[in-house]
Image (spheres, grey):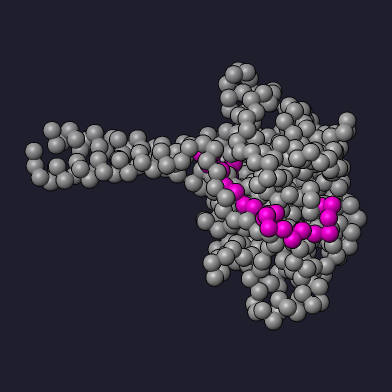
Amino acid sequence: MKPNSIQSGFAVASLLLFVVSQTSAQKFGDAVLVHEWNQLEFAWPSNAEKEAAIQNQTYVPERSMLAGIKIHKDNVYVTIPRWRWLNGHPVVLAKVVNTTGKAVLEPYPSWAAQKQGDCNALQYVQSMEIDPNTDLMYVIDTGVIGHQLSLCPAKVVIYDLKTNSQIHKYEFPQEVVNRSSVFLNDIVLDYINGTVRYLYITNTFEQTIVVYDLQTQSSYKKAHPTMGLEGNGAENITINGVTYTFPMAINGIAMSPDFKYVYYSSLAGYNLHQVPTSTLRSKTAGTAGIRVVGRKTSQTDGLAHGNKRIYYGAIGLNAVYFWDKEKDLVDQKIGEDRVMMTTQKELKRDNRTMEWPDTFAFDEQGWIWVITSRLQIYWVSSGLPVTGDPFIRVWKIYVNETSYLNRANERTVDGNNGAKTLSPHLVGGVHIIVIISCLSIFSTAWSRIC
């Protein structure tokens, strides 16, 4: 037995032990509270500018509330809609940064991009999506302040996160998005042959899915009864014993990782619906293939699809739930076009800190992020009450999955309408294939030692 062989063997063994220790560091359902605020704070250029904004009421601190969230290369991006008031919201899109030991919101990509009344800037941003394959952020801008002051046409803006610059803008025509009844709520991307071809956007007030074709730079919309209010009292949501009324139509939207199906639901509804992307991709296909997949445990705001599961906020239960779609596909021995939502499980619940689970995001280490905001109290009050208990929280929960967009640029290059299987699931932030490779290396090294 040679000394070099012994050293090599121990080195490989140490590496293997490190990998195994890393894989056992997290378990499914582990939750971490990342940020919390009583009121949001912004990274102002100077204290004088902050005070001036307070004086002229372009900044009213209690009026800013988080809605959307996305993660990209350890950066947290959030949206702050100009929701109920005509003034007081200085920023609508931001990145979370740490300043003097506390988390504040830095306007993204700049302060100029937040200017109310400037149609070249962002007016009302509820949500966005980030493509990890291209470092591009797709932002939907309703253009209407407080859901009543229509300043600008609704639009899509694309930013390059590598350069922090705007690279594309598209304004929706009136026949697709009516400026008097618009609420662009959530967005998913559709890959075809290695690139993003379509954007699918929920328009809550018009009860439609808006389709934007990046290749032709044209748009159209799809309408169906399942995109409206469900009825039967589904608009009444009881949270911690208090009932609130939210007559809101289509809201959350999620894309399957093979890019064959889109899932959506109304806030005023329990049902989860499915539509084939082949229907959405064709302006003339009508609403073929739309169906009810099943009834969720509660009304839902945001949706998110990982490698194998669909996650949703069970608002009436102060919890995050998931549909184990992969399990149901196996158990029912059926295709995704006919599978029914049977296996629903609780991921995380807390009656105080998980009120109103809103929007979701995946990172690349196997965590799903979620904003919880007590939106129901904010919605019926004059703003965020001043209390000792934070109203706005950002959580991350370990689920051993990544986004539907993971490696989509590689998985869809075969040119068909589907996509190849996602890469192996993450285990403790390390791919299973890495562990197998380490075992192989260790085995080879040990055979040489012996």
Quadrant where the C terminus lies?
top left
Magenta-highlighted residues = 379-407
The x, y position of residue 110, in whole percent, is 66, 70
Where on the picture, by quarter, is residue 89? Answer: bottom right
Q: Quarter-wise, where is residue 227 in the image?
A: top right
What type of secondary structure mainly makes up the magenta span? loop
Residue found 68% across the figure and 55% down from its top: 389
Q: Is residue 402 magenta?
A: yes
- Left or right for 413, reference 84: left
Query: What is the quadrant of the N terminus in the image?
Result: top left
| Residue drawn at 54 percent across, 38 percent down | 29
| Residue 57 placement (x, y as % from top left) | 81, 73
Residue at horizontal 61 percent and vertical 23 percent from the top:
328
Queried whether the magenta region covers residue 15, the answer comes back as no
Left of 430 or right of it: where is 241?
Answer: right
Left or right: residue 152 compared with residue 438: right
Farthest front residue? 388
Can the viewer see residue 397?
yes
Q: Nearer the viewer, residue 263 or 384?
A: 384
Residue 254 visible: no
